[in-house]
Amino acid sequence: MKPAATASIGVIGGSGLYEMEDLHRVREVRVTTPFGPPSDAVVVGELEGVRVAFLSRHGRGHRLSPSEINYRANVYALKKLGVSRIISVSAVGSMKEALHPGHVVIPDQFYDHTKRRIGTFFEKGVVAHVAMADPVCRDEASKLAEAARQCGATVHPGGVYLCIEGPQFSTRAESLVYRQWGVDVIGMTNLPEAKLAREASLCYATMALVTDFDCWHPGHDAVTVETVIATLRRNVALSREVIRAAVPKLEGARPCACVRAIEAAVITAPGRIPAAARKRLAFLLGTPPAGKKGR
C-alpha cells in the first residue's frame, strides 16, 4: 500500500542540497521498504503546481558516506510514493578542460568503478537483467538541460559520469588514468542509483554540478572539502532554480521506454521464484504477492 502522501517527480539531493526550500504544503513521510530505511524522511510538497518528493541522499546534516547510502531503500521509497521520474542532483569533479566549476553537465552515460555496493533489487532466488546500454532517460535529460539553459547556466549535454567508491578523492595517478579513459566528470553516488531506477522502471537523469578539476589539472590545486563547499554554495541556488523550471516540463505522460524496463527482464522461471522473493519484489514487478488478488 502506498503512503497517503504521493508525488510524481522525485528529487534526490546530493552534497550541499539537503532540503528544498521552495516546496509548499509540505509533509514529511517516513517510508518503510523491504530493503531497510532510506537516507532520511522524504519531504513531499508542491512545486510549480506539481507534487514533488525530495530526499537528501546523504541525510540532512550529511551523515552518510557514499558507500553507506542505502540506494535500494531510497529508490524504492520514491517509487512507493508514486514517483515516476527521478532528478539526481550531484556534485562532481571535472575531468576535461572545457568543464569548469559552476558548469552543469547532463551525463548520458555512466561508468561503474565502485566496489562495495549492492546494485540490484533482484537477488535471493530471482534474477533480472535490465537493459542499461542507455542508462539515462533521454526525454528527461533533454528537458533538464533545457531548464538549465533557461536559468542561464552553462550546460553541457551528454558525457560520461565515472562513479568511484570514495569516500577519498582520487590520487593524482588515478585521476590521470581516468582522464585517459575519456570520462567527463567524476562522482561517488550515481551508481548503483541509476541501475536501481531502471530496475524500478523509473526515468532517471542527473544534473551534475561541477565543483572542481579533481587533481589532474596542473593549474589548479588538488581538490579539498573547502574548495568543493565554496563552489557548492553557489551551485545549490542554481540547482533549486533549475529544478523549479524543470518540474513542469517533466509532469505528465512518459514518452520513453523506461516505464517498460522490467518487462521481460526477469529470467527466473515464475514457478521457481521463492515466495519470500515474490513478496519482496511484488511492488516493483507490478504484481500482487502470492495469495493476494490485484485490483
Image: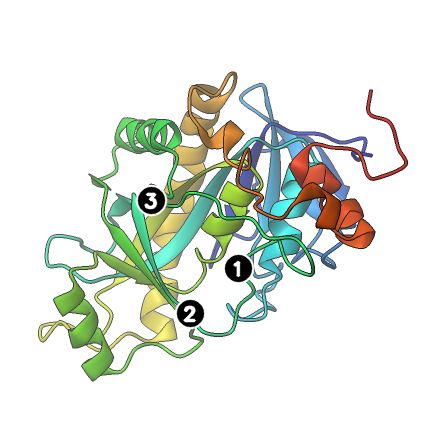
Looking at the rendered image, the quarter that the N terminus falls into is: top right
Q: Amino acid at mark 3?
A: Ala
Q: Residues within 10 Å of mark 3 (few under 14, many from 20)?
A: few
Q: Are discs 2 and 1 less than 8 Å apart at CB? A: yes
Q: Earlier in the sequence, mark 2 or mark 3?
A: 2
Q: Are discs 2 and 3 less than 8 Å apart at CB? A: no
Task: Give the residue drawn at x 73%, y 58%.
Answer: 37
The residue that mark 1 highlights is 119
Q: Earlier in the sequence, mark 3 or mark 1?
A: 1
Alpha carbon separation for disc pair 2 and 3: 18 Å
198 lies left or right of 38: left
The residue that mark 3 highlights is 133
Q: Amino acid at mark 2?
A: Thr
Q: At which x and y percent is residue 55?
A: 61, 47
Question: Where on the picture, by quarter, is residue 53?
Answer: top right
Give above or below for 14 relative to 253. Answer: below
